[in-house]
Image (cartoon, rainbow, N blue to C red):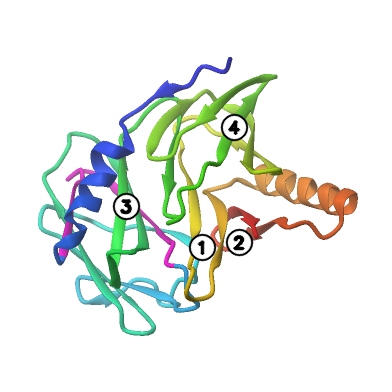
Amino acid sequence: MLRLTIGASVLGLALAGFKLGNLRNSLLELSGKDQELRVCNAIPTDDTLSLIYDGKDLTTNPMDYKECRTFDVSLKTGTKLRFQTSNGTKGTFTVWDTPECDAVLLLVAHRREDAMNSVSFLSHVFCPAKTAQVAVIDTYNDKSPVELVITHAGSKDTLSFDTAVGLSPGSYDIALKAGKEEKNFEFAAQASESYVVLRTGWASKKNSSVPQELVIYPLDEMSKTRSAAVKKEETERSGASSLSASLVLGAAVMLCIQ
């Protein structure tokens, strides 16, 4: 079995923001030292997302759904990150407290069924590590069973949503299994890099549903090339499948389950 080093649980940090989602502001600890902000738009609509920081629009060109970006900003206790969609939906994320590390803050803007008219957040803080770190986050509202399997050098293990794991540098295959459908893609984990594996989408009985998808960010050029090759091979073999894979903006790879 593939041995995964369990890192700081996303539940300890991301769900802190989840529980505070009923308030206007969501809160999370962030380092007061060197910081890198990574934002993913998991709000399942055609509306774009803008990030306002210190009175300035950092996005310039608003972020599309499933897009992730990295921002070089200086954050400190009390910093407010304001988000607004193109249809006027708003949300504010407030930074507080300061862990003693040079942090990468991952911030996922998404929708919750109990807060449909505001932007909600899930988040995780990465502190430096020699291994690669992967936060596995789920924003899909339908929690029907799916299996996320990671394989390395012939060994397999299961990834759980809302956790973070440490991976040794190397090439990995991730398979998303939903019912009888399965989709695979590869990525190369780099030492000391921080990644997110993010499930997006929206299931609705009243309105149009948005297919669940899997996004990984960031990817290097080798991983993007391998993922494109896997996509081409599987498309040629199976034709138009109800599971499709494609590359999305921000060097992220996406898997789609209809």
| Tags 2 and 3 touching, CB below 8 Å | no
The three-letter code of the residue at mark 1 reads: Lys
Q: Residue at x 39, y 83 (%)?
A: 86
How crowded pointer 3 is (Cα within 10 Å; few <14, some 14-19, many 20+) is rated as many
Tell me the mark number nearer the camera, choosing from 2 and 4.
Answer: 4
Label 3: state its secondary structure: strand
| Tags 2 and 4 touching, CB below 8 Å | no
Work out how far the residue at label 4 is from the one at label 3, CA to CA, in angstroms. 22 Å
Above-or-below relation of 11 to 51: above
The three-letter code of the residue at mark 3 reads: Leu
79 relative position to 134: left or right: left
Work out how far the residue at label 3 is from the one at label 1, CA to CA, in angstroms. 14 Å
Tell me the mark number nearer the camera, choosing from 1 and 4.
Answer: 4
The three-letter code of the residue at mark 2 reads: Val
- Disc 3 target residue: 122
28 relative position to 221: left or right: left
Q: Indicate the quadrant where residue 34 lies.
A: top left
